[in-house]
Image: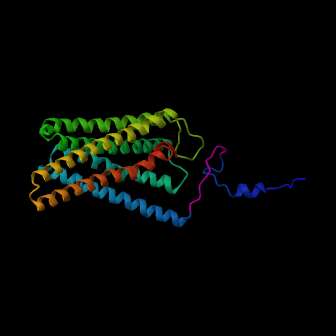
Amino acid sequence: MEPEFIFNRTDVVKDIHLCYESENVSCIMAITPSTIRVLLYIFLGSLAVFTMCGNLLIIISIIYFKQLHTPTNYLILSLAVADLLVGALVIPFNIALSVSSCWYLADLICNIGRSLDVSLTTSSILNLCFISIDRYYAVCQPLRYRSKMNSHAAVIMIVVSWGVSALVGIGIIIMGLNEGKCEGRCFSFHIPLSSIIGPVLSFYLPAIIMLSTYLKIFLVAQRQALSIQNTNCQSIKSGASVSKMERKATKTLAIVMGAFLICWTPFFIAGSGWLSE
C-alpha cells in the first residue's frame, strides 16, 4: 500500500496573503522584505533623479545656446524630453509596481501609467533610431547632408517618433483593457497581436535600422581612414593619428550599440517587456 500524505490546508491558506481579503477574485500579494523594499526605493528613486537632472541639463543647454540650434541637436532635444518624462513619470510608476505587487489606486491611473510607459519608451528608442539616420547622412553622404537633414526634416522625424509612440501606447492599452484576471493588480494582458506588433514597432525594427546604419557608418569611416592613411603613407605620425581616430570611432559605435542592446534586449525578450506584469 502506498503511503498517504496528509497536508494541513489551514497552514497553506495562512501563508497566502491577498490584495483584497474580502474578494474571491483578489490577486495574491507578494511579500517583499522591508530591507529589499527600502533598497529598491533608494536605487530606483536615485535613478529617477539622475535621469531627470541629466536630461534637464541637456534641454536647457540646447534651448539656451543658439549655436546648438541644429537639426541633430533638435533630435537630441526630443530624446532628452522623452527621457526626462521617463524619469519623472514612468520610473515612479514602475517603482510602485516593483515594490508592491498590489495596486490600490484607480484603474484609470493604472491605464494611464501603462500607456505612458509604452509611449515614452517607444519615443526614446525611435529618437535614437532617427539620430542614427542623421549620423548616417553626415558620415556617408556629407555633400547631401545639409539638403537632406535640415530643420524641416528634423521636425518631421520628431513628429513621427512621438506620433508612432502615442499610437502604439494607446492602441495596445485599448486592446488589453479587459484582460485583467484578478483584482488588485495593475492589469496585465497577453494578446498575440499586441505581443507581436508592439515589440516590433518599439524595439526590433528600430534596432535593425540602427544596427544597419551604424554598421554602414563604421565601414565608410574605416574606408575613409584607410584612404587618408594611404594618401599620407609617407608620414608615420599621420598614420598613427588616423589609426587612433579609427579605433576611437570603432569604440564609440561599439559603446552606443552595446549599451542600447544590453539595456533593452532583455526587457523585450523577457515576456515582451511591458506587455506583461
Magenta residues (range) = 23-32
| In the foreground, 98 or 2 | 2
Regarding residue 65, the answer to whether it shows in the image is no
| In the foreground, 16 or 253 | 253
Left or right relative to 18: residue 233: left
Indicate the position of residue 17 as horizontal and vertical percent values. 64, 55
Question: For the point 30% across and 42% down, which residue is it?
Answer: 129
- Counting labels gives 0
Question: For the point 47% across and 46% down, which residue is it?
Answer: 269
Question: For the point 34% across and 35% down, which residue is it?
Answer: 164
Q: Determine the residue located farthest toward the bottom in the rendered image.
A: 35
Indicate the position of residue 181 as horizontal and vertical percent values. 59, 40
Q: Determine the residue located farthest toward the front in the rendered image.
A: 234
Indicate the position of residue 55 as horizontal and vertical percent values. 28, 54
Indicate the position of residue 264 as horizontal and vertical percent values. 40, 49
Regarding residue 175, the answer to whether it shows in the image is yes
Q: Main secondary structure of the magenta part?
A: loop
Is 24 included in the stretch rendered in magenta? yes
How has the structure been colored for display? rainbow
The quarter of the picture where residue 32 lies is bottom right
Question: For the point 19% across and 40% down, which residue is it?
Answer: 137
Q: Is residue 51 above or below residue 186?
A: below
Is 5 included in the stretch rendered in magenta? no
Left or right relative to 15: residue 274: left
| In the foreground, 65 or 142 | 142
